[in-house]
Amino acid sequence: MAETKFKGHKGSFKRIKTEQQLYLLPVATFLTEFGYKAQITVEHNCYVLYLQQEDGSYKPTAYWFKEAVQALRELPEEPNDAHQFI
């Protein structure tokens, strides 16, 4: 199983750049079981999952794989509280 890292623990939590040239602050960063970097952000009071692309940018995905679900379970129920959590 891939390691999940949250801000406050060892790990990188720099702002991520999306394909739309937006910069977002993730509330969770982790690697998938296949070694891809994934980030969870908060947008409009909802958690959004992004996967890193080959060019280094991040693209949202509708597929919440097991590592993402595990990370989501450890975040606050209210997404807008997540930035206080980190």
Image (tube, helix red, strand yellow):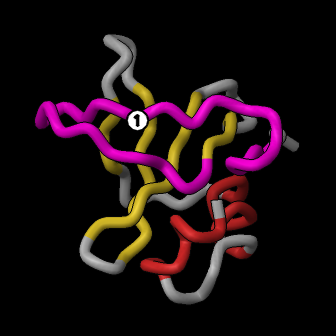
* Residue under the image location 65 percent in, 69 percent down: 85
Was residue 80 drawn as part of the magenta stretch in this picture? no
The residue located at (43%, 29%) in the rendering is: 52
Where residue 25 sits in the image (x, y, percent)? 41, 47
| Quadrant in the rendering for residue 71 | bottom right
Magenta stretch, main secondary structure, is loop
Foreground pick, 28 / 50: 28
Q: Is 68 placed above or below 84 here?
A: above
> Outermost residue, left direction?
20
**Direction from residue 42 to residue 86 in the image, left or right:** right
Q: Where is the C terminus found, in terms of image quarters?
A: bottom right
Q: Name the residue under label 1.
A: 15
Q: What stretch is highlighted in magenta?
A: 4-28
User: What residue sits 74% from the left and 64% below the top?
Assistant: 70
Per the image, label 1 sits on a secondary structure element best described as loop
Query: As displayed, is residue 11 above or below residue 76?
Result: above
x, y percent for residue 2: 81, 39
